[in-house]
Amino acid sequence: MLSATSIKKLSCTCIPHLRCYATVSSFLVNNSIGKPPVPPSSTNPSHTLSQLDQTVLASLQRTAHRPRYSLFDLIGQYINNSGRILDVSLPYESRPVSRRKVALEENDNDIVLVTNCIRDEDTGEHKITVSSGFVLEVPTLPGSMVVTCAHTLEEIRRTPLALKHLREPSLRSVLSGMFVVTGTSSPIFHTVSSVSSTLPRSDILLLTCDKLPVRTLPVSPYPAPPQTTIHVHLAVHDLPHGEYSQSDEWRPGVGGTWRRWGRGEVKGYRDLAGRETKPGTYDSLSHMLFAPLPTPGSSGGPIVDEESGAVVGISLGSRMDNRIEGIRGWGVPSEAIYEMFSLPGLEGKM
């Protein structure tokens, strides 16, 4: 029988290249590194949101006689018009004149809400998703064109209530629609008539509706360099507490919500693979990182350059950048909006 000393000598002789490697637990990989934050629970909606729900459902009931504006038809357009280039151009306004700059200090409401709604009249079950948006300056159109995020539409189209209608499209008990909401004390619901174009990879879409009583915002086709001072439009359903509790800065927003501009800066850019990219190179600037973190309900809202007063990005949410930098705001640079429009001078030639 070998002694402990003999076993030690034998192991060193027979396995001369044995090495120990560091390992990472799958728990850490799946739960700590690069995982986006868990969205807040919506199982207990706030009173303000419930009030908004009631108003949305009432507007849906009033438009039930116009089936061509159903949410399911708009979802079909969302799919079919992916990557579509419109036969109109969007003005380049990287340095807008004073009257066109986004009014950060004034108590105006140029930011709109976009609501998607489905209701089953037989069961009373309903689903509503809400995002922010803003109106683009497209002079040749008789109505208004609104840009917003796409993930709230993706969310509602995959709900059991929507899938039930898709399986049984003849169901007459299901009402649906999409609305653009303007106004503070007395919200006005404008029915969305079409989804003009979408960029699913960039998480943005263009909506068309009747002329809206709000100002259009100037959009810059050029990415803002990192460390540029910006203002991010923040929206909430109730006055927040904790990290977002600057109550003196919150003002009444659209549809009974609250809003304010959060001052911060551009942190950087990423391509579709998540690699770091930089403006002024041939890199693809698919997404932008910024501070401050947007609040739930801010998705689709504008990110404004403080110096120029032009929109330089669209807020989409937040994500973990890395373990050192932590969670950052996640958006898309405004140059992506121009991918859905014709170049100036090429209108009608596409």
Image (cartoon, rainbow, N blue to C red):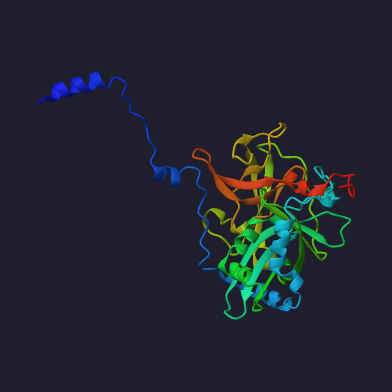
Residue 215 % position (x, y): 80, 58
In terms of depth relative to the viewer, which is nearer, 79 or 114?
Answer: 79
Residue 95 placement, left or right of 56: right
Q: Residue furthest left?
A: 1
Q: Which residue does the image show at 63% across and 59% down from the upper left?
A: 154
Residue found at the far bottom of this picture? 122
Quarter of the rendering containing residue 29? top left
Q: Position of residue 334 (x, y in %)?
A: 73, 46
Towards the viewer: 175 or 192 = 175
Which of the 4 image quadrants contains residue 235? bottom right
- Quarter of the picture containing the N terminus is top left
Residue 48 visible, this angle = no
Q: Is residue 138 left or right of residue 10?
A: right
Residue 52 drawn above or below residue 208: below
User: Which residue appears at 62% of the width and 58% of the height?
Assistant: 248
Task: Locate residue 190 relative to residue 7 in the image: left or right.
Answer: right
Q: Is residue 167 visible?
A: yes
In-front residue for pair 197/259: 197
Count the numbered circles shown. 0
Front residue of 28/297: it is: 28
Q: Position of residue 127 (x, y in %)?
A: 60, 69
Position of 331 relative to 192 (above/below):
above
Q: Residue at x 87, y 58 (%)?
A: 141
90 relative to 201 in the view: left or right: right
Residue 179: percent from left, percent from top: 72, 67
